[in-house]
């Protein structure tokens, strides 16, 4: 999965796999979260958000199941 660098205080990069609907977020604390059953629309909204970290906390973290790597 290709991840894109983002301008955020705590997030380094964000990636999305359209085949598995998996969103991947790499944090500066050296953790990677994979979120499952995320729509492409949610990924696009996250990437276009004025504050990616706020959008992540409000719309991704509390809504989708995830694993930590």
Image (tube, rainbow, N blue to C red):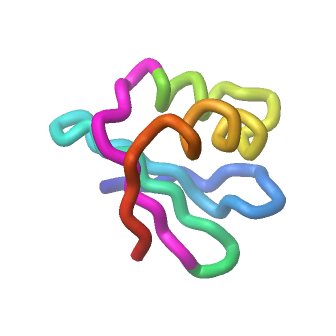
Residue shown at the point (57%, 41%) measured from the top left: 62
Residue lying at the far bottom in this picture: please name it: 30
The quarter of the picture where the N terminus appears is bottom left
Query: In the rendered structure, which segment of residues is drawn in magenta?
Result: 31-41
Asked whether residue 39 is drawn in magenta, I would say yes
User: Relative to the observer, which residue lies in front, 68 or 43?
Assistant: 68
The quarter of the picture where the C terminus appears is bottom left
Residue lying at the far left in this picture: please name it: 19
63 sits to left or right of 46: left
Q: How many discs mark residues in the rendered view? A: 0
Instruction: Classify 14 as above or below 43.
Output: below
Residue lying at the far top in this picture: please name it: 41
Residue shown at the point (48%, 69%) measured from the top left: 32
Task: Identify the image quadrant of residue 31.
Answer: bottom right
The spot of residue 19 in percent (x, y) is 16, 37
The spot of residue 36 in percent (x, y) is 31, 44
Residue shown at the point (48%, 31%) measured from the top left: 43
Task: Identify the image quadrant of residue 22.
Answer: top left
Instruction: Classify 3 as above or below 17.
Output: below
Instruction: Classify 34 as above or below 43.
Output: below
Residue shown at the point (57%, 45%) measured from the top left: 61
20 sits to left or right of 5: left
The spot of residue 44 in percent (x, y) is 51, 25
The spot of residue 24 in percent (x, y) is 43, 54
Asked whether residue 37 is drawn in magenta, I would say yes
């Amino acid at each position: 999965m290709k991840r894109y660098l983002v301008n955020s205080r705590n997030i380094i990069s964000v990636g999305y796999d359209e085949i598995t609907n998996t969103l991947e977020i790499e944090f500066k604390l050296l953790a990677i979260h994979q979120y499952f059953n995320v729509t492409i629309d949610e990924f696009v909204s996250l990437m276009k958000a004025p504050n990616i970290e706020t959008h992540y906390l409000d719309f991704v973290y509390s809504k989708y199941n995830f694993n930590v790597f």
